[in-house]
Amino acid sequence: MKLFTWIIMGCYMLLFTFLGVILIWFAMQWLPVEGAIVWLGRVYGERNLRLACFLTGAGLILINWMIVQLTLAKLQRQKIIAFENPDGQVTVSLSAIEDFIRRSARELPEVKKLRSDVIAGKGRILVRVRVTLWSEAHIPEATERIQSLVRSRVAEMLSGIEEPIQVRVHVAEISHREEGEAQPPRREEKIHAPFRGF
């Protein structure tokens, strides 16, 4: 599969290099217009040359479609975390982890709104958290609690992997409570034991 990818990328690079050279020649007036018109007229008049142009165009469309498919497959692979359990491979969607983090943040009374991006790289899992805090929150303590909660919940959720989890917090906004807006009651931390099966 890797060789196939390199062949497709090589064809794509050759095509765009060729088109780039033609455009540069045309811009520098190194490409004789009369010769190009004569060559195009010859191609248009001969059946074999028209067939070659048709096959080349169809091949380029096919190569373009394959590159799009390979790119989408690569992006899809980057959107999951995979690990091995005794019963087989498990894959977890990064969007599921992000939703889990958002729901877990409801336990923190200092947090008004939280959004996260999870990036699964080689040898680590990076969680970038963008948070809106209430104005009465003490920022160093609140961000430390957010990091601790996110790290522990993600580690608990993905108990089958060994990669370190890094949590970066960005306080994007500090919001004031409106008159009469009650502070949500603080929930007790629940300890969730990871499911291990039977």
Image (spheres, rainbow, N blue to C red):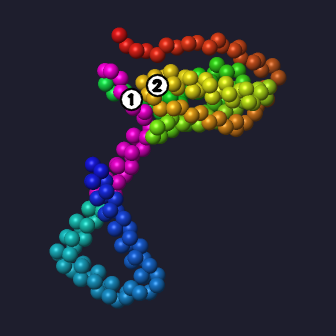
| Image location of residue 40, percent across then percent down | 29, 81
Q: Secondary structure at mark 1?
A: strand
| Image location of residue 9, percent across then percent down | 34, 59
Magenta segment: 62-87
Mark 2 residue crowding within 10 angstroms, few (<14) / some (14–19) / many (20+): some
| Image location of residue 185, percent across then percent down | 71, 14
The amino acid on which the numbered mark 1 sits, given as a three-letter code, is Phe
Chief secondary structure of the magenta portion: helix
Q: Nearer the viewer, residue 154 or 108?
A: 154
**What residue is drawn where x is 73% and y is 36%?**
173
| 119 versus 90 height, above or below | below
Q: Which mark is residue 158?
A: 2
Q: Is residue 117 magenta?
A: no
Q: Secondary structure at mark 2?
A: loop
Q: Quadrant of the C terminus?
A: top left
Report the Cα–Cα distance between label 2 and label 1.
9 Å
Q: Is residue 75 magenta?
A: yes
| Image location of residue 116, percent across then percent down | 58, 34
The amino acid on which the numbered mark 2 sits, given as a three-letter code, is Leu
Q: Specify which label sits upstream in the sequence, 2 or 1.
A: 1
**What residue is drawn where x is 40% and y is 76%?**
21
Residue 52 appears left or right of 61: left
- Residue assigned mark 1: 83
Numbered label tally: 2
Whether label 2 touches label 1, CB < 8 Å: yes
**Residue 134 position by quadrant:** top right
